[in-house]
Amino acid sequence: MTAPGAQGEDRGESRVLVAVDGSEAGAEAAALAAREARLRGGALHVVHVLAWPLMATARMPLPPPDSALHQQAEQIVTDAVHRATEAEPDVEVTWQIVIGQPLRELDVLAQEADLLVLGSSGRGAFAAAVGSVAVHMSASAPCPVLVHRGREAPEGPVLLAVDGSEDSDAAAAFAFAEAGLRGAPLVALHVSPPRPGPAPAGMSAMDALLFEDYPRDTGRDDADRARDQEVAELAIAAHRKTHPDVRASVRTERAHVRPALIDASADAQLLVLGARGRGGFTGLLLGSVSQALLQHAQCPLTVVRRDTAMTARTAA
């Protein structure tokens, strides 16, 4: 439902969608989303999902325009639009207030977007578990999901996490397009988990597999290195051909996936990974790896599902 007086009711042009909630993280996400819209030569749509007591049982009209709740919602989107236009004055920005469950409403709104942008922390409807909002949207949104994280104005390459899965192939397509739009190099990082070493005294073999901090054999022989290199090279081979302008390189590591990706993100301007993987990335969206990245990545993070439509367009 569009708020009375909202601008830009036609969302067909709004290729980048950002959800805001009045928090500073939401405002930063609006600025980031404006930059993404500028890169694509498209428009930005700012949305605030207004949750109130009856939302769970019925779709209700917004409160009267003179109510405090309505005025607060308008102030949230006004502030976010200001941050967006301040960051990118030439980007067309529209806004909307909807009422309902944030996850459900964002799922619907994302149908018309090429990219959904979220803050890494929030308040109101997002405050209880912003990590779960990002995980849910990454798993269900019909477009890639970009979560604002990390240091201010990050520089460096676009970092692509690859594991040879179909999801990482979709992520590779998105990452190459992003690198091309940004004029940035791309680094494809393949992290293979270390071999378990001897289990500590009193720990069963099964428990040892689940205990990340016990001693492990992190070494690789030449055959290991060759296999890891092959996985990474194959993951980006086709995309090198379709994006010959992107300077792409490959890096491999034998390490724990979570800390390896977190550490690598310190030198990147964007981290891109698939929604699900295999091997070291199994259960990424619902498990500890995704939670760690959402909480500790040192640059913005984009999660791409293999069935999302990726249309990173060049500027007109």
Image: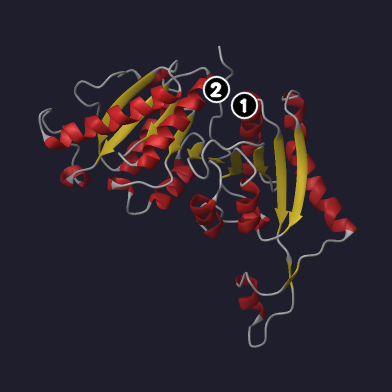
The one of 191 and 267 positioned closer to us in this rendering: 267
- Judge whether 293 appears above or below 194 on screen: above
Circle 1 SS class: helix
> Given the image, on which type of amino acid does mark 1 rest?
Arg
N-term-proximal mark, 1 vs 2: 2
Q: Position of residue 72 (x, y in %)?
A: 20, 35
User: For residue 243, which quarter of the picture?
Assistant: top right
Residue in view at x 77 percent, y 38 percent: 249
Count of numbered badges drawn on the protein: 2
In screen coordinates, is 53 left or right of 90? left
- Judge whether 62 appears above or below 136 on screen: above
Circle 2 SS class: helix
Tag 1 and tag 2, C-beta contact below 8 Å: yes
Q: Which residue is mark 1?
A: 182
Q: Position of residue 194 (x, y in %)?
A: 73, 64
User: For residue 240, which quarter of the picture?
Assistant: top right
> Given the image, on which type of amino acid does mark 2 rest?
Leu
Q: Position of residue 17 (x, y in %)?
A: 41, 29
Q: Which residue is mark 2?
A: 39
- Judge whether 75 appears above or below 14 on screen: below
> In which quadrant of the rendered image does the N terminus lie?
top left
Cα–Cα span, label 1 and label 2: 7 Å
